[in-house]
Image (cartoon, coloured by chain):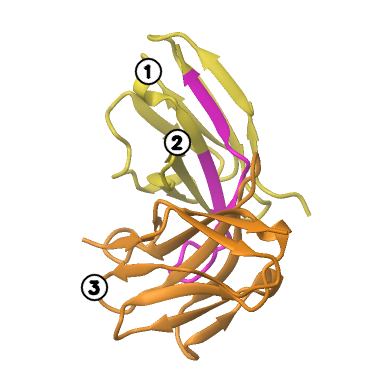
Chain colours: A orange, B yellow
Amino acid sequence: AQSVAQPEDQVNVAEGNPLTVKCTYSVSGNPYLFWYVQYPNRGLQFLLKYITGDNLVKGSYGFEAEFNKSQTSFHLKKPSALVSDSALYFCAVRDRGGSQGNLIFGKGTKLSVKP
Amino acid sequence: GAGVSQTPSNKVTEKGKYVELRCDPISGHTALYWYRQSLGQGPEFLIYFQGTGAADDSGLPNDRFFAVRPEGSVSTLKIQRTERGDSAVYLCASSDIGGDYNEQFFGPGTRLTVL
């Protein structure tokens, strides 16, 4: 069965410091991986995706993620955190076994950036 | 342009009642998805439409849940004989092609509370 794990419920970072939000996955075949962000009372917003090619993927708001096949990881990173980055972050993998439609999400990691 | 919209934003109902939740996808998007997000969890897949037909309804928890998309645009999620365990945020998403690599655009969700 395909799955996504986000091992940290919460990540605390000081503004200006680098941040990492961890994600590991378990899929059959090549993974299609996504990161979404959820702000309070707002819908999920797409940040970035890995389909193929370069292992370092750049996305919205200065975020990037590194695909590591040997470690089955897709950690989200940002060189310098902003207070406005505080939100709930979800890693997701496309379900290759079904209709090729739905995403399988991790449980989410709350990012808190303090001034 | 306009994003995915969902109505109502909040719905409070009593146990045993029938509810309908509406989703207006981004214009031209052929793929539409319904997810359910419980507190502290990531979204869980319910059903996926490609055009007017349900391509995958494997995520619907039981036969009290049903969804339609009669004209290939607006979709309605219908829940009969609601139970307290149905309380969650119901998310709708759309994408222009229901393939593996196209990101999904999410609506703000409908918060359903069953008393």
On the question of residue A108 being in view, the answer is: yes
**Subunit of label 3:** A
At 48% from the left edge and 48% from the top edge, which residue is drawn?
B33
The secondary structure type at the circle numbered 3 is loop
At 39% from the left edge and 45% from the top edge, which residue is drawn?
B44
User: Looking at the rendering, in which quadrant would you find the N terminus of chain A?
Assistant: bottom left
Residue B35 sits above or below residue A32 on the image: above
At 47% from the left edge and 90% from the top edge, which residue is drawn?
A53
Disc 3 target residue: A28
Identify the amino acid type marked 2: Leu
Q: Which one is earlier in the sequence, the residue at label 1 or at label 2?
A: 2
Q: At which x and y percent is residue A106?
A: 39, 56
Mark pair 3, 2: CA separation: 29 Å
At 65% from the left edge and 46% from the top edge, which residue is drawn?
B4
Marker disc for residue B16: none
Q: At which x and y percent is residue A58?
A: 61, 80
The secondary structure type at the circle numbered 2 is loop
**Subunit of label 1:** B
Identify the amino acid type marked 3: Ser
Marker disc for residue B84: 1
| Magenta region, residue range | B91-113
Label 2 crowding class (10 Å Cα cut-off): few <14, some 14-19, many 20+? few
Identify the amino acid type marked 1: Arg
Disc 2 target residue: B39
Q: At which x and y percent is residue A59?
A: 63, 75
Whether B62 is among the magenta residues is no
Q: At which x and y percent is residue A41?
A: 65, 39
**Same chain, marks 1 and 2?**
yes
Q: Quadrant of residue A30?
A: bottom left
